[in-house]
Amino acid sequence: MPGRHFLQIPGPTNVPDRILRAMDRPVPDHRGPGLPALVGEVLSGLKQVFQTTRGEIVLYPGSGTAAWEASLVNTVSPGERVLAFNIGHFSHLYADCARRLGVAVDEVDLPWGDGVPPHLVRERLAGDTAHAYRAVLVVHNETSTGVASDLRAIREAMRSAGHPALLLVDVVSALGSLDFRFDEWEVDVALTGTQKGLMLPPGMAILCAGPRAIEAGARSTAPRYYFDWRPVLEETRRGYFPYTPATLMLYGLREAVRMLLEEGLPTVFARHRRLAEAVRRGVTASGLSILCRDPALVSHSLTAVVVPAGADAEAVVRAAAQRLNLALGTGLGRLKGKAFRIGHLGSLNELEVIATMAGVEMACAASGIRVPLGAGVAACQRFLMESHVAAAQTAAR
Ligand code: PLP
């Protein structure tokens, strides 16, 4: 199909030309003299993106799943207990990863479409008077449901329960799109991949580990070799790695971090908030519903859309791909066939959002869902026009 492919799944996201160009170069010697400057800039830039001065960055060739495993084997030993909340496909898989590594997991089952309730975190931890829980596992932005849990409130709940458990946070579809504050929210480990808010191709796992987690890592008896972060931390301090790094990805990562910091994190977050709101207005005006129940927890990096009873969300995704070359996210796990997902994270602008909304309307209509063509697009446009004027007025004041 001629024209550009619209990749509007909730990651991998579109890779900006500037990043592609930064990666388009001969493969360097990963033990050569050029590496420390590159690695140094990547690590210090990533720290700014995680909003930390006390966290250390750990990199592996891999993906978000690899980062899950690394976050666990370095902090929790087999037989120890962790607390997890099943609020969607990925939070369940993170818990399952821990279980398969021999960790005892208390997984609290909650309705998909909810966030992690801070009062429940407090209650569970307050009830654990023996302090058996080593860690609490939270997915900041649940990519299967489009719900962003309130991490500040979760950390506050842990503090008020007086519990020493580590806070391990999956920021795979949050970092670089949603405000995430490693230091302020006293997160112990945050983990992500390169293919979402960082605007790179898939291929690297990134962790940020705080001092308490690094200390726990020294005590962990979990068998680990590749994912042992101690040699990685030691070697990267000198600008090298204990394995062959994905060198071209490092050039891309440096460029991505430069782009985020040039735009400014507050501006990046505001852009995502505004574009996400435009999508939500469009979806609602089309007569479709948003899965996230609490408007205060809606994700600004993706929207999960519930199709009317009797309709098939898979057919919408198929129609979008086949007729329009538009990739939308399918419903995952128990949402299969019931919901589809619109990704609006990473490098994205107003016209791309409007085109995506037009594609969603057309794909719905093509798969037999009655939507008033143009209503969603118009709502999207109206909001973008009004919010642009409002932003300009605020800036002029
Ligand atoms: N965590 C979340 C929140 C995700 O959205 C994903 C993938 O989409 C993963 C973990 C798994 O990451 P990966 O597919 O990069 O292994």
Image (cartoon, grey):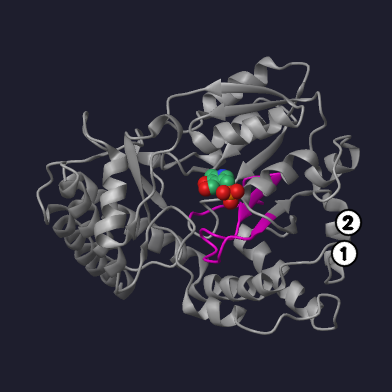
Above or below, 378 against 309 in this view is below
Q: Which residue is mark 2?
A: 231
Q: What is the x, y in percent for residue 58?
A: 75, 57
Q: Secondary structure at mark 1?
A: helix
Count residues near mark 2 (Cα–Cα under 10 Å), then give few for <14, some for 14-19, many for 20+.
some
Q: Residue at x 84, y 39 (%)?
A: 216
Closest to the observer, 319 or 59: 319
The N terminus - image quarter: bottom left
Above or below, 288 against 242 in this view is above
* Residue 338 appears left or right of 52: left
Q: Are marks 2 and 1 in contact (CB under 8 Å)?
A: yes
Q: Residue at x 31, y 48 (%)?
A: 317
Count residues near mark 1 (Cα–Cα under 10 Å), then give few for <14, some for 14-19, many for 20+.
few
Q: Residue at x 51, y 80 (%)?
A: 18
Which residue extends farthest left? 372
Residue 187 shown in magenta? yes
Q: How many numbered badges does the structure rendering display? A: 2
Above or below, 32 against 224 in this view is below
Q: Give the residue type at disc 2.
A: Pro
* Residue 277 appears left or right of 187: left
Q: What is the x, y in percent for residue 363?
A: 22, 51
Q: What is the x, y in percent for residue 122?
A: 60, 24
Q: Residue at x 83, y 31 (%)?
A: 77
Name the magenta segment's main secondary structure: loop
Q: Which residue is mark 1?
A: 235
Q: What is the x, y in percent for residue 394?
A: 30, 68
Residue 72 shown in magenta? no
Report the magenta residues as a range.
178-206
- From where the camera sits, is residue 171 visible? no
Q: Secondary structure at mark 2?
A: helix
Q: Give the residue type at disc 1.
A: Glu
Closest to the observer, 91 or 278: 91
